Image (cartoon, helix red, strand yellow):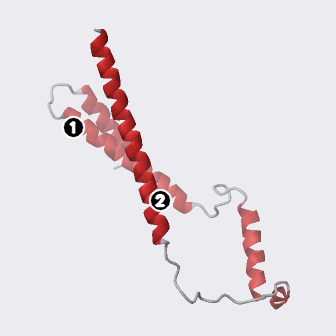
Amino acid sequence: MGKDALLAERATLINRKDDDFSDPNVVQLLGKLKLLEHNRKTEQMKKRKTEDLFVPDLSALREEIALLKSFENDHHIKDIVKVDQFAVEPSETIRPNRLFLVLGAMILGGAVGVALVICIFASKLVQTRNSSVS
């Protein structure tokens, strides 16, 4: 069904107020219209020949890609870089220092505990002052 036919059917359904099924049909037709509109946009995008209008500076990007691909076949570029040492796998694995982890956890736990005790003590002190003033 074309867009015009769906619009005409929608208009007649809107004008008919005595039918209980008019509201769901109108909603269904609006959904079909949106799908049809989306499909037409998709068709237009598929028909385009170049992406020049949609990607800014596409020609500059294509030139840079061509330049970089030309370096792959150029053997003179290897003379620019000199490798002093090749990478070597480490002889032993790196593990976290357990002593630092335990000490850090103890210090952090102590600090949180002291802060909690101070907060509880301060709240009890405020409560006792409020009750004695009243």
Residue at point 64%, 61% (across, down): 51
Q: Measure the alpha-carbon separation of dots 2 and 1.
A: 65 Å
Q: Could you say where residue 82 lies in the image, as x and y percent from the top left?
A: 82, 87
Rendered-image quadrant of the C terminus: top left
Amino acid type shown at disc 2: Gly
Secondary structure under tag 2 reads helix
Residue at point 78%, 82% (across, down): 71
Secondary structure under tag 1 reads helix
Q: Nearer the viewer, residue 125 or 31?
A: 125
Quadrant of residue 60 in the image?
A: bottom right
Q: Nearer the viewer, residue 130 or 74?
A: 130
Q: Could you say where residue 123 lies in the image, as x and y percent from the top left?
A: 34, 27
Question: Few, some or many C-alpha atoms within 10 Å of disc 1 (few <14, some 14-19, many ≥20)?
Answer: few
The vertical placement of 97 against 48, above or below, is below
Amino acid type shown at disc 1: Pro
Residue at point 47%, 69% (across, down): 99
Point out which mark residue 105 bears. Answer: none
**Seen in the image, is 77 located left or right of residue 24?**
right
Q: Residue furthest top?
A: 134
Residue that numbered label 1 is attached to: 24
Point out which mark residue 104 bears. Answer: 2
Quadrant of residue 10 in the image?
A: top left
Quadrant of residue 67 in the image?
A: bottom right
Q: Nearer the viewer, residue 32 or 101?
A: 101
